[in-house]
Image: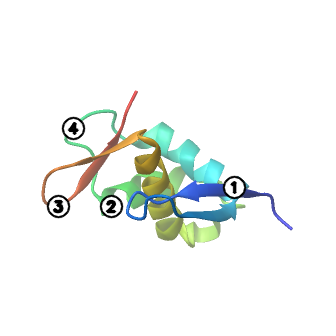
Amino acid sequence: MPELLQVENVNHPGRTSRVNAAKYAEMKRAFDASLPRSAPGATQDDIRELVKPILCRKLFPGGKTCGWWAKTVQLDLEAKGTMVREDCKPLRWHLTD
């Protein structure tokens, strides 16, 4: 059984879920390596494309489930205040330093 990690969701304060810790850590590493640290940030589609080529192929073979994990990590980092949702259309996000 994989180790689990508790994550938050900025859209549902106080609500948590448990997810695979290794996949979360790998997606967070990809975020740290590829996402902007300031505006204008990246759209949801941009985020998926930026992280996909640098993800561990063993954990994300062929990029499968990449979109779901990117959204899960994005919502958790937003809830923790380490990722910012910009007030624009389309929505864009960037990491904080």
Residue under label 1: 5
Secondary element under disc 1, as helix, strand or loop, is: strand
Q: Are marks 2 and 4 in contact (CB under 8 Å)?
A: no
Relative placement, left or right, of 15 versus 90 is right
Numbered disc 2: secondary structure: helix
Mark 3 belongs to which amino acid?
Pro
Give the side of residue 20 with respect to residue 29, left or right. right
At 59% from the left edge and 70% from the top edge, which residue is drawn?
Answer: 62
- Left or right: residue 15 compared with residue 81: right
Residue at point 69%, 55% (across, down): 5
Above-or-below relation of 25 to 12: above
- Residue 13 spot, x, y in % from top left: 44, 59
Do callouts 2 and 3 mark residues in contact (Cβ within 8 Å)?
yes
Question: Residue beneath label 4, please?
Answer: 39
Whole-number angstrom distance, CA of label 2 to CA of label 4: 14 Å
Q: Earlier in the sequence, mark 2 or mark 3?
A: 2
Kindly identify which residue carries mark 3: 90
Mark 3, secondary structure of its residue:
loop
**55 vs 32, nearest the viewer:** 32
Q: Are marks 1 and 2 in contact (CB under 8 Å)?
A: no
Name, please, the residue furthest toward the bottom: 64
Q: Quadrant of the N terminus?
A: bottom right
Q: CA distance from mark 1 to mark 2?
A: 23 Å
Precedes in sequence: disc 3 or disc 4: 4
Q: Which numbered circle lies on residue 44?
A: 2
